[in-house]
Image (cartoon, rainbow, N blue to C red):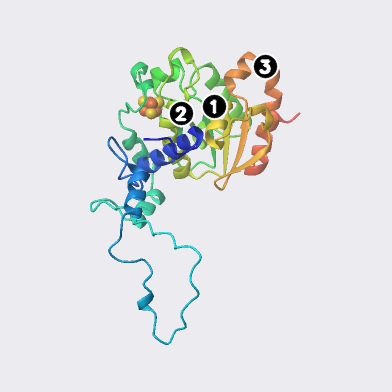
Amino acid sequence: MPERFPASLQQKIEDRLRYYEDLGIRLFYTDRGPGSTGLAAQEAVASAPSPTPVFEETALPKSTPKPAPAKAAPPAMHPPLVVPPTGPSLFEAMDKVKDDTLLKIREDLGECTRCKLHKGRNKIVFGDGNPKAQLVFVGEGPGADEDMQGLPFVGRAGKLLTQMIEAMGLQRKDVYICNVVKCRPPENRAPEPDEVSTCSPFLMRQIDSIHPKVIVCLGATAAKTILNTTRGISQFRGEWLEWRGHKLMATYHPAYLLRNPPAKADVWKDLQKVMAELGLQLPKKAKS
Ligand code: SF4
């Protein structure tokens, strides 16, 4: 199939279709798959001779003045995409999105083998915390400790994140913590683009389901994935951004803070902005 869009746009379209697929909306890609002609098929149908003209002049009442001849023939109407008879209607699909729950998303994820990260994992690290949290932290992916326990942020970086949460006057059970990818990348490398694009629809569903007031992206991978940007995190770290009706703040990953302790001051400033947004008071022990 010839490439019809720039590669980056094509990738975005594929990611979006995959996201809808994971939501159970299967109205958009019934012509995808091996042997599919996709858009080409629609265009071929549209350009084929039609037994019924789209605009019939004889349908006009006799008394109606004859309209001026059009300069160009109107474009043929594309036939609607075929809705599979057993699939949900669009309204049913939207209800499904509205009623999505973390439990349902976890069931849909299953014992996932959608990307190559499944080969080296011990446990899927789906996410942990309050399903109605006002605050969601999103990291990059599980490390060794998380992979063993099936829980996010339980290693050294996780302990630091816990301290940060407690410094905000909260407990881990008050917030929700998850990652862009749910399986540990080998040697703790950064997840690759195909892994991120395959796994991130589940993250989006998790955020949609929780509907937090604030999302804090921990590190560049989370920020770039959610914001769909290639900008470096240093260009927008600590700034309030808007994402699909949520306030979003990007800050450094706790693992980075372990390597660069002076950056903790920047992160604490960012978290204080989050606290103000959530109406949280500085805990007494943090006042000086
Ligand atoms: S990283 Fe995500 S998409 Fe890849 S196998 Fe694990 S759960 Fe599936």
Sequence-wise, the earlier of marks 2 and 3 is 2
Q: Which residue is rendered at x = 50% and y = 33% of the image?
A: 8
Q: Residue at x 46, y 18 (%)?
A: 143
Mark 1 or mark 2, earlier in chain:
2
* Residue positioned 51% across, 41% down in the render: 133
Label 2 close to label 3 by CB (< 8 Å): no
User: Residue at left 27%, top 63%?
Assistant: 51
Residue at the disc numbered 1: 221
Kind of residue at badge 3: Pro
Q: In the figure, 112 relative to 51: above or below?
A: above
SS at mark 1 in the image: helix
Question: Quick check: marks 1 and 2 in contact, CB under 8 Å?
Answer: yes
Disc 1 packing (10 Å; few <14; some 14–19; many ≥20): many
What element does badge 2 sit on?
Answer: helix
Looking at the rendered structure, the kind of residue marked 1 is Thr
Residue 19, x across and y down, in percent: 41, 40
Pick the residue in front: 213 or 283. Answer: 213
Q: What element carries label 3?
A: helix
Q: Marks 3/1: CA distance?
A: 20 Å
In the picture, the disc for residue 261 is: 3
Nearer to us in this view, 47 or 153: 47
Residue furthest right in the image: 288
- Does any portion of residue 130 appear in the rendered image? no
Q: Nearer the viewer, mark 2 or mark 3?
A: 2
Q: Which of 143 and 120 is in front in this view?
A: 120
Mark 3 and mark 1 lie on one chain; the one further toward the N terminus is 1
- Residue reaching furthest left? 86
Label 3: few (<14), some or many (≥20) within 10 Å?
few
